[in-house]
């Protein structure tokens, strides 16, 4: 039957000896030969499983004896033997027709990875893909359209119907009016978050399926090394621009614990999620100075915090390797399916929270607790130079980042936030606490200690920075 | 990038509970997954970006994220299908280059094979990189678990002028081999037929 | 890099210029994990290698596989140069 791979004889001898030792107790899903080979290659997991066994020292001795008999490392010899057999089989079973050199997509690959052309391409993608498509089109045109429809056609109708059939004011407020489940919760989700998140996921799927992301990783690797990350982290970070919660889960692909911690921190602190990003881009696009200051400040914080984290977080510097797959033409059905599935996940995650937030606010208002918290936040608002009306927005922001962003949208459209205040609010809200869902995933992926540390840091940092920024902008009299 | 899967996926115990049990001289040869449910379990494993998730979607009708970069899948996803009249459970796994895991998500796939145990391993490889990827096939065969080899992306290989002789490869390795192009659903029927060979008509009798 | 002093026939990949081709003579790194990773990705001694790009990351081609690596990993691949 199958070709039993024969390793160099010292290795084969060692395998038999280890197999014999394992035979007493070890009965596992995988063969003893496999386990012996893993041990000979110093596989950490297998070693730690066997460490306490009485025969482990004996195994160690066999390994070091064998190693002493070989000129190259055991890992190497084993890999080489397999490699040669694999190559021989490949030779035997494949026909390679001498084809004309295949350089069809080669030029495109070269353009994306060469720094002179790659960086401009990246800027174009960011400008058209994120700014124009997600920010201006998704966060501007689409949101305005749907939001307008809600304000003019749905909300009044809902308010009227509810007023007609529900006799109690308290229940009316739960469903409709300023903070109702339908008029606030559903409206935020459908009119503000949905268009932005959809456009972002569409764009992101396109990038994913084309094979651009690995190329972006290699472009960014050197720069990312200075902030304690490797090029690989670009993928969770960009996904974080869509949803920080998803991105936190994806930090698993990163090599070292250190990298995962830094990426989680940067995601929690500096990366706005798509709803925030969309709203902020859409609002600030009308005030170029504000947009410039916001992006400059966010960039500086990203680099600064990354740099410091790279120095402070313990662990070895990360290495970078990544296989570069061929560029592929994305297929439309695949992209639509993927976007649809992501949206479904996203809404399953947020809708209950939006509704829950509406209920909580309702309860809070009924009991007066909401007003107490809001009043507690008001000094903080003043401290940041913001109108006290902004306090609830910060409260929502904690439930969901996007909820806070949507609140900001409301504030702006009612003319409460302008110029400098808009910038300060945007910066503080972007930095401010990752939403509950993201916190939950941080807890799952990083553990309670890291999560608490990050959360506390983020809150303190967000408000202090907001304060400083406000002072600075006031002194500089930009607005 | 699979956040949404986590809600439908199972988490075969990622911690090393399995190992500990074994260390105390637990004797069992039959994989845990199949013995507990009586259902055939099949794991899709292989290097990153070879089309495991795409194949999983085709086989189970459950969507998990497919995208063109290595490291898309970070968690095991579970999906069911009916093959040869029997219910079969498939696992999609994060890509791994070898049986010796280095990153966190790589060890997930290894743990599934080594600790949980499955009835069949479908090793998915990229036809363009046959020689390189057969390395892992050889390692998987060494575990003595049943292995079925899927040589995927033959469409891209053929564009490069590479043709893989399915029968010859099967003969050389001594395991079933299917060449296919999952993106075009080419070879899917053939794969299902070969998987059916591993699904016992009454899977309960397999248990011991 | 004094450690490379003993070998005259081959040089670390990061010393070579773009478009250099050669054969992999050895893979050495103080971090065992990196060696294992390279082996697992199909980078073995004796294989033909082309250095496609040096900046911002090193891009190598081994067989039909294209891999991006950083300077440290590039340094661990020792190449016997065939042509420039
Ligand atoms: N041309 C072609 N492309 C394919 C084929 N199978 C998969 N792909 C593409 O290959 C890429 C990777 O597919 P995935 O299913 O995400 O790969 P995976 O093995 O799950 O990858 P990881 O989760 O990273 O381990 C996607 O862009 C697919 O569309 C095929 O047969 N032909
Ligand atoms: Mg996958």
Image (cartoon, grey):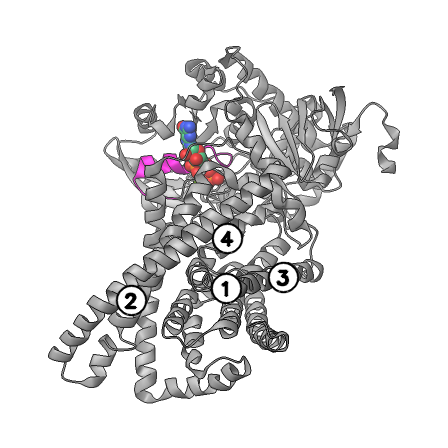
Relative height, residue A103 to residue A453 (above, below): above
Mark 3–mark 1 contact, CB under 8 Å?
A: no
Mark 1 lies on residue:
A443
Of the numbered discs 3 and 1, the one sitting upstream in the chain is 3
Q: Position of residue A209 (x, y in %)?
A: 44, 38
**Which chain does the residue under circle 3 lie in?**
A
**Residue A79 in the figure: left or right of residue A196:** right
Q: Residues within 10 Å of mark 3 (few under 14, many from 20)?
A: few
- Earlier in the chain: of badge 3 and badge 2, it is 2
Mark 3, secondary structure of its residue: helix
Residue C16 in sight in this render: yes
Quarter in which the C terminus of chain B is drawn: top left
Local crowd at mark 1 within 10 Å, few (<14), some, or many (≥20)? some
Residue A346 in the image, given as x and y percentages of width and height: 36, 57
Magenta residues, start to end: B46-64
In this picture, is A415 found above or below A230? below
Q: Position of residue A244 (x, y in %)?
A: 47, 58
Provide the chain ID for the residue under circle 2: A
Tell me, for residue B17, which label it has, or none: 4
Residue with the mark numbered 3: A300
Residue at the location (59% across, 64% down)? A297
Given this view, does label 1 or label 2 mark the residue nearer the observer?
2
Q: CA distance from mark 4 to mark 1?
A: 21 Å
Q: Which mark is residue A187?
A: 2
Instruction: Please name the residue shown 52% across and 66% down the image.
Output: A290
| Residue found at the very far left of the displayed protein | A165
Res B44 seen here: no
């Amino acid at each position: 039957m199958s070709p039993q791979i024969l390793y160099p004889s010292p290795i084969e001898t060692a395998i038999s000896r280890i197999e014999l030792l394992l035979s007493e107790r070890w009965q596992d899903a995988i063969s003893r030969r496999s386990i012996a080979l893993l041990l000979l290659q110093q596989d950490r997991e297998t070693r730690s499983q066997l460490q306490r066994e009485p025969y482990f020292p004996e195994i160690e001795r066999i390994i070091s004896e064998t190693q002493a008999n070989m000129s190259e490392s055991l890992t190497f010899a084993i890999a080489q033997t397999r490699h040669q057999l694999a190559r021989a089989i490949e030779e035997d079973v494949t026909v390679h027709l001498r084809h004309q050199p295949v350089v069809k997509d080669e030029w495109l690959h070269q353009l994306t990875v060469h720094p002179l052309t790659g960086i401009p391409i990246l800027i174009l993608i960011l400008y058209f893909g994120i700014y124009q498509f997600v920010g201006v089109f998704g966060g501007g045109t689409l949101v305005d359209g749907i939001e307008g429809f809600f304000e003019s056609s749905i909300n009044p109708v809902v308010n009227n119907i509810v007023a007609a059939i529900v006799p109690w004011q308290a229940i009316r407020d739960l469903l409709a009016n300023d903070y109702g489940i339908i008029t606030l919760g559903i409206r935020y989700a459908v009119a503000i978050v949905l268009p932005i998140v959809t456009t972002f996921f569409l764009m992101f799927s396109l990038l994913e399926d084309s094979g651009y992301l690995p190329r972006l990783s290699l472009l960014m690797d050197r720069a990312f090394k200075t902030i304690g990350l490797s090029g690989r982290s670009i993928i969770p970070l960009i996904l974080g621009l869509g949803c920080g919660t998803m991105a936190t889960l994806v930090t698993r692909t990163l090599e070292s614990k250190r990298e995962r911690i830094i990426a989680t921190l940067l995601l929690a602190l500096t990366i706005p999620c798509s709803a925030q990003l969309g709203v902020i881009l859409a609002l600030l696009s009308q005030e170029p100075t504000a947009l410039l200051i916001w992006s400059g400040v966010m960039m500086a914080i990203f680099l600064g915090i990354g740099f410091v984290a790279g120095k402070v977080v313990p662990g070895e510097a990360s290495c970078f390797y990544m296989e570069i797959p061929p560029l592929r033409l994305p297929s439309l059905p695949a992209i639509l399916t993927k976007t649809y599935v992501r949206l479904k996940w996203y809404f399953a995650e947020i809708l209950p929270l939006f509704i829950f937030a509406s209920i909580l606010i309702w309860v809070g208002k009924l009991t007066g607790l909401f007003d107490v918290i809001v009043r507690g936040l008001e000094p903080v608002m003043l401290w940041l130079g913001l109108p006290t009306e902004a306090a609830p927005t910060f409260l929502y922001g904690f439930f969901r980042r996007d909820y806070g962003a949507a609140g900001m949208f409301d504030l702006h459209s009612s003319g409460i936030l302008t110029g400098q205040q808009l910038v300060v609010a945007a910066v503080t809200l972007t930095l401010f606490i990752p939403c509950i869902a993201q916190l939950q995933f941080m807890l799952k992926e990083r553990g309670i200690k890291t999560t608490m540390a990050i959360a506390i840091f983020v809150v303190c940092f967000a408000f202090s920075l907001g304060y400083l920024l406000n002072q600075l902008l006031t002194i500089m009299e930009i607005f | 990038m699979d956040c949404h899967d986590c809600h439908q996926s199972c988490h075969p115990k990622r911690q090393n509970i399995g190992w500990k049990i074994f260390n105390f001289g637990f004797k069992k040869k039959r994989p845990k997954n199949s013995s507990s449910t009586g259902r055939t379990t099949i794991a899709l494993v292989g290097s990153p970006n070879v089309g495991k998730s795409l194949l999983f979607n085709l086989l189970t009708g459950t969507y998990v994220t497919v995208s063109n970069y290595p490291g898309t899948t970070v968690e095991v996803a579970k999906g069911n299908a009916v093959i040869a009249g029997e219910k079969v459970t498939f696992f999609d796994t994060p890509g791994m280059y070898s049986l010796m895991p280095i990153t966190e998500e790589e060890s997930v796939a290894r743990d599934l094979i080594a600790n949980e145990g499955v009835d069949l391993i479908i090793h998915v490889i990229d036809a363009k990189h046959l020689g390189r990827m057969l390395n892992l096939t050889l390692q998987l065969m060494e575990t003595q678990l049943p292995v079925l080899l899927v040589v995927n992306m033959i469409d891209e290989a053929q564009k490069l002028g590479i043709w893989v002789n399915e029968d010859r490869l099967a003969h050389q390795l001594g395991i079933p081999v299917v060449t296919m192009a999952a993106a075009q659903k080419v070879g899917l029927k053939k794969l299902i037929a070969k998987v059916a060979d591993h699904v016992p008509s009454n899977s309960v009798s397999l248990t011991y | 890099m004094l450690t490379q002093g003993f070998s005259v026939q081959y040089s670390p990949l990061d010393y070579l210029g773009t478009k250099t081709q050669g054969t992999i003579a050895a893979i050495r790194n103080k971090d065992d994990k990196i060696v294992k990773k390279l082996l697992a990705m199909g980078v073995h001694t004796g294989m033909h290698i082309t250095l496609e790009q040096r900046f911002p990351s090193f891009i190598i081609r081994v067989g039909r596989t294209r891999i991006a690596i950083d300077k440290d990993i590039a340094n661990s691949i020792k190449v016997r140069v065939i042509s420039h």
